[in-house]
Amino acid sequence: ATLTLGDGTQVSLEKGAPFQTQNANSNGEEIVYEAGERKTTEVAYNYLTIPRGGQFFVKLSDGTQIWLNSESKLKYPVNFKEGEPRKVELVYGEAYFDVSPSSEHNGSSFKVYNQSQEIEVLGTEFNIKAYRDETNIYTTLVEGKVSVNSAISDQILKPNQQSNLNLEENSITISKVDVYNEVSWKDGVFSFRRKPLGDIMKVLSRWYDVDVHFANEELKKAGFNGVLGKDQNIEDILKTIKSFGIIEDYEINNKQIILK
């Protein structure tokens, strides 16, 4: 992961390599910010960029916990200003938020911005998936209550509901989902239920840092149910998919995969 400090300095956070600033400590797998002076008039922002194949945990100065999936970028303040909403931005990618309640911060609400929408919460757990190569933004509520605000409409989500903001069609839909399948990534598991192979391979390509090609475009529509460990190597996963008869064969050439 790469940490960009307020002055533009970039720091590579490598597993097992300690890094410390005045406000934060990192061991290369997570970074934890300490609560500091909130009466400051200027807010210093940090950026955390997670590459393909990576995952990272950050604890903000207000106690909010965030898990960042591979190929994601988060902008957040080193300290939040007292008396103002706590604001962060998921620039792109996927993140799971466990937000510190407003009741512990003098009623200060928590807002997450990303692309074409704003999520406002009072204290809750939810997941946002907003990758640059996808035209849909998915917000999944695990517990609590969130308001999903966009140029199209404002929607209130209940637990086990997911909003789907379609940027191409300029529409938003709300549906009930199996939350586990949507957020299991943060616990080291890929859980797929009736997912098209095309969508599954997008997820796997980010985690394993590979490019996937289909010899037959129809294969993208094939559905798959299964739970896969993120500690498995990509060939074992491809063997599993092949054993279900979803693909006839595959070919691996460095970071290029062809499904047949």
Image: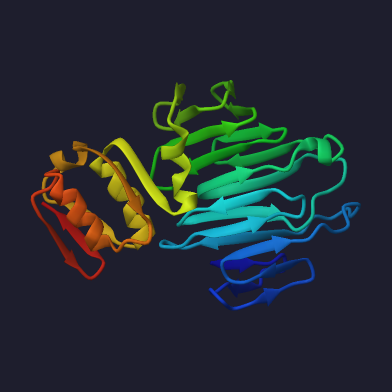
Q: Relative to 236, does residue 131 appear above or below in the rendering?
A: above
Towards the viewer: 95 or 165: 95
Q: Relative to 86, does residue 8 appear above or below in the rendering?
A: below
Q: Classify residue 167 as left or right of residue 225.
A: right
Seen as rendered, the residue at the extreme right is 39
How far from the left and from the top, in percent, is residue 228? 32, 51
Q: Classify residue 91 as left or right of residue 46.
A: left
x 73%, y 43%: residue: 100
x 71%, y 74%: residue: 20
x 74%, y 72%: residue: 21
Q: Relative to 163, does residue 23 appear above or below in the rendering?
A: below
How far from the left and from the top, in percent, is residue 81? 84, 48
Q: Relative to 58, does residue 139 appear above or below in the rendering?
A: above
How far from the left and from the top, in percent, is residue 84? 83, 40
How was the colour assigned to the protein in this rendering?
A: rainbow
Q: Quadrant of residue 108?
A: top right
How far from the left and from the top, in percent, is residue 51? 46, 63
Q: Classify residue 79 as left or right of residue 211.
A: right
